[in-house]
Amino acid sequence: MAEEADLDDVWVLCRDVLENGAPLDLTDEMCVLLSRAAQQVAIGQQDAEDALRGHSTAMTLLREIHRRIGEGSNRLDEARDRVSDLQQQGDFDGAQQVMRDVLAVEVVPFYREQAERTLKKSAGLAEVLATGRLNPNLPDRPQLAVLAQRIEQGHALELTDDLCALLRRTAPTAAISEAETEEALKSPDGAEALMGMILSRFQEAQSRFLRSMYRMTSLRDAGDLEGARQQMRDVLAVEVVPRFREAAEEQLRGLDNPPPEA
């Protein structure tokens, strides 16, 4: 997204100028970038233009852009983590309130947009939890997790065409064969077991990969590249979930081909 790219570019500029002491050169190109970024963090165009007439006021503008990007990004990341935790606990009302709280204070349009999308997604998942009806506009795996919550609440699993289609789509992402999938879909109990297998395999794979990434990064930063590589080799020795096998292979390639020294 162009807007996100602008915010990323300005964030790098802020780090260079405000943290590392690089000069702020008000070229035409720089002024265009800062003016556009100012509007993207809800600073009026006229205010930005006025600020860009002098170096001191341009620095003040840059600091304000930096503050709004930093606060908005951190607030959104923390809120998303909280939403995820609450939804796993089945508290969708609480999850939605977290995003409403973000929207009550956020001024940056990009972050407001992201918060509104998360709020809409949470409301949709709450509807799936309440009714058991799948929503074609929501991602597959979160809907599976919500259906699993419905089962835990005592609701029977309905083996609808939509559910069968969802399980056929998601089973390969957990390295479950077509034959296993079709056998499971012969009964609600089989479909329930298949759903649990898909969710548990993905969750276990994600946890394993994140733990290995942490150890790999620590070893790499300590200069132990062979130890860092071994972390990813250990993942590949046991991992069957395609997404995390690909991620481990990508990390291993990066360690085998480090960037040239500056």
Image (tube, grey):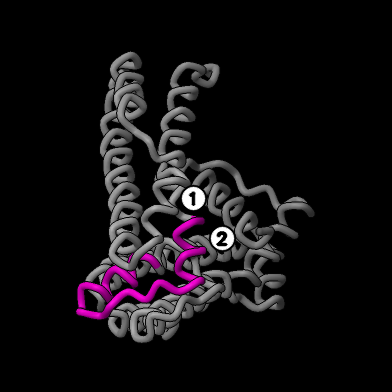
Give percent across and percent down for residue 179. 44, 45
166 is within the stretch colored magenta: yes
Magenta highlight: main SS: helix
Residue drawn at (33%, 35%) of the image:
213
Q: Amino acid at mark 2?
A: Leu
Task: Say if mark 2 contacts mark 1, CB within 8 Å.
Answer: yes
The answer to whether residue 56 is seen in the rendering is: yes
Say what secondary structure mark 2 lies in.
helix
Q: Is residue 28 above or below residue 92?
A: above
Viewer-closest of 189 and 151: 189
- In the picture as drawn, the residue positioned furthest to the right comes out as 28
101 is within the stretch colored magenta: no
Decide: few, some or many residues near mark 1? Use Cα within 10 Å; few <14, some 14-19, many ≥20. some
- In the picture as drawn, the residue positioned furthest to the top comes out as 226
Q: Amino acid at mark 1?
A: Leu
Mark 2 highlights which residue? 62
Residue drawn at (49%, 30%) of the image:
250
Say what secondary structure mark 1 lies in.
helix
Q: Is residue 215 above or below residue 63?
A: above
Mark 1 highlights which residue? 18
